[in-house]
Amino acid sequence: MELSYKTAEKALQAAKEKALSLNIPVSIAVVDTGGHLVALARLDSVYGVIDFAVKKARSAAMFGVNSDVMGSIISETGIHGHGMLNSNHGLLTIAGGVVLQNAEGKIIGAIGSSGGTPDQDKEIAEAGAHAIA
């Protein structure tokens, strides 16, 4: 199953509800497995975090792991990750990008949140991911 708009909207709605319950003005992006934007919400956040949310989601989708896990992988290699971070039109490897999976466990995209702390962003994105798992 590919990521439909209906599924992306369900993940987005759950993440929005989590962000509102935490009273955190974030931007939330949902992308397909190719990193292409499917749905976006900006909850009165500053403009700069829109791109961060998209890049966190793209990082998770394109590598099949949450964005913070990819950051750990890069830092554990002991090499300068500049080239990796600037690949694919820029990646963002801090917490807040979470892989989306269908009921069978197949990766169908990712969701990214930005505007809170990294832990808050991850919690918000995870709420979206759990809504469709």
Image (cartoon, helix red, strand yellow):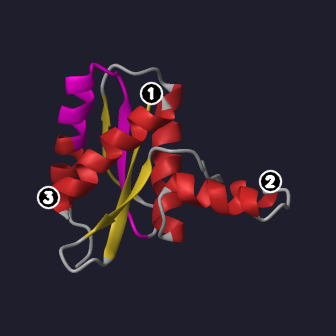
Marks 1 and 2, the one that precedes in the sequence: 2
Residue 19's x, y, as percent? Answer: 27, 30
Question: Considering depth in this image, is 5 or 97 the residue closer to the camera?
Answer: 97
Q: Residue at x 18, y 74 (%)?
A: 103
Spatial distance from mark 1 to mark 2, Cα to Cα?
A: 23 Å
Outermost residue toward the right in this view? 79
Q: Secondary structure at mark 1?
A: loop
Q: Tell me which amino acid carries mark 1.
A: Gly
Q: Residue at x 80, y 53 (%)?
A: 82
Mark 1 Cα within 10 Å, few/some/many (few <14, many 20+)?
Answer: many
Q: Which mark is residue 115?
A: 1
Q: Secondary structure at mark 2?
A: helix
Magenta stretch: give its range: 15-33
Question: Do the residues under discs 2 and 3 have CB atoms within 8 angstroms?
Answer: no
What residue would you read off at disc 3? 6
Q: How many marks?
A: 3
Q: Residue at x 37, y 45 (%)?
A: 29
Q: Residue at x 31, y 39 (%)?
A: 124
What residue would you read off at disc 2? 82
Question: In the rendered structure, does residue 50 fall within the stretch colored magenta?
Answer: no
Marks 3 and 1, the one that precedes in the sequence: 3
Outermost residue toward the front in this view? 76
